[in-house]
Amino acid sequence: MADKGIDHTKITEFIPYKTMAMDLESILANLTRMYVSRGNADMVELLTLSTAELFPIGSFDAEAERYEYVLKLAVPVKFHNHLRNHILDTTIQPQLLKDITTITAPYLHEFISAVFVVIRIEQDSNWRDAALDWVSGSSQADEKPRQFDMFICCAPDDENGFANELRSLLTARNLKVAFHPLVSTKERDIHHLLADFDKTSRFGVLVVSEALAKLSFPIESLQQLVEQVLNPGKRFCQVWDKIGRTEVANFSDSLARSLAFSTERMTSERVCELLLEVANLQ
């Protein structure tokens, strides 16, 4: 049965007038012109570096004559950091909304109700080839018995925090845990650490935290850890401990691309349960 509260005839009638999404680049160019006139280099750079998306919210009124959108502007991590204080103290986003309302005034049947500036995370598609490599050759090796069920890596300063809580939760379930604070970040030592994981453990976890981000990693060492996390065939994942995506991206763009369970949003017990599901250790 049709919803009596929605005038579908009206919605259909006004579809030809909904052109804002098609005009988005032109809208941004005209908004940029406004900031050029003001001499506002930060706003010009923000708009030119951003990837813009319009998200349709729906009809704003019962007659379906006005349609509402939210605009998301995703900018590179470094530039987001440059503007971060202004974004957090809510000066940039309201200014963008005010000015874009001026630019989009000709759109009688559409409007933008909010503007959000977020960091842009480039997606990684190399995991597909890595997973196929596992299918073609590594799956038989994975059937070998392992000494440990879980292999935990963390910063030395996190030894008594979440990493230790996770170890306790796992051992309480009679699982064998290898616990490895990263006392050395040298390329050779990280290589040996990961080789030890491959030989001895069924699944690995890297605890990413502010303490880990403060460690001095040679590029080659960090790349080894990143590749271990991004490759699904390596049976290794990350947990973000009291750290957000922006901070992770400052530490490693690549790690920020990969989803992670987070202690900011979940209890240690819940993180443990989810890791056991992913690792097939239930």
Image (cartoon, grey):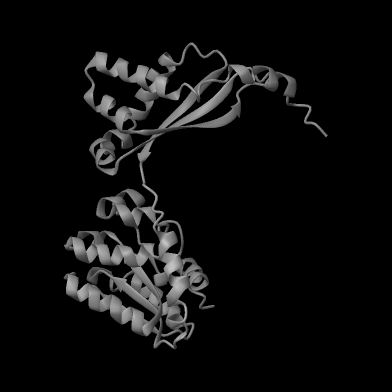
* Between 206 and 235, the one nearer to me in the picture: 235
Q: Quadrant of residue 64?
A: top right
* Between 268 and 120, the one nearer to me in the picture: 120
Question: Residue at 32% across / 55% down in the picture?
Answer: 254
Quarter containing the C terminus: bottom right
Point out residue 206 in the picture as x, y percentages from the top left corner. Answer: 34, 68
Q: Is residue 265 above or below residue 44?
A: below
Q: Residue furthest top?
A: 106
Q: Residue furthest right?
A: 1
* Between 53 and 125, the one nearer to me in the picture: 125
- Residue 7 seen anywhere in this rendered image of the structure: no
Residue 83 in the figure: left or right of residue 204: left
Point out residue 93 in the picture as x, y percentages from the top left corner. Answer: 37, 29
Count of numbered circles in the view: 0
Point out residue 169 in the picture as x, y percentages from the top left corner. Answer: 44, 77
Question: Residue at 77% across / 31% down in the picture?
Answer: 3
Point out residue 260 in the picture as x, y percentages from the top left corner. Answer: 41, 59
- Residue 116 seen anywhere in this rendered image of the structure: yes
Q: Quadrant of residue 61?
A: top right
Q: Quadrant of residue 119?
A: top left
Question: Residue at 32% across / 70% down in the picture?
Answer: 161
Question: Residue at 52% across / 75% down in the picture?
Answer: 280
Quarter containing the N terminus: top right
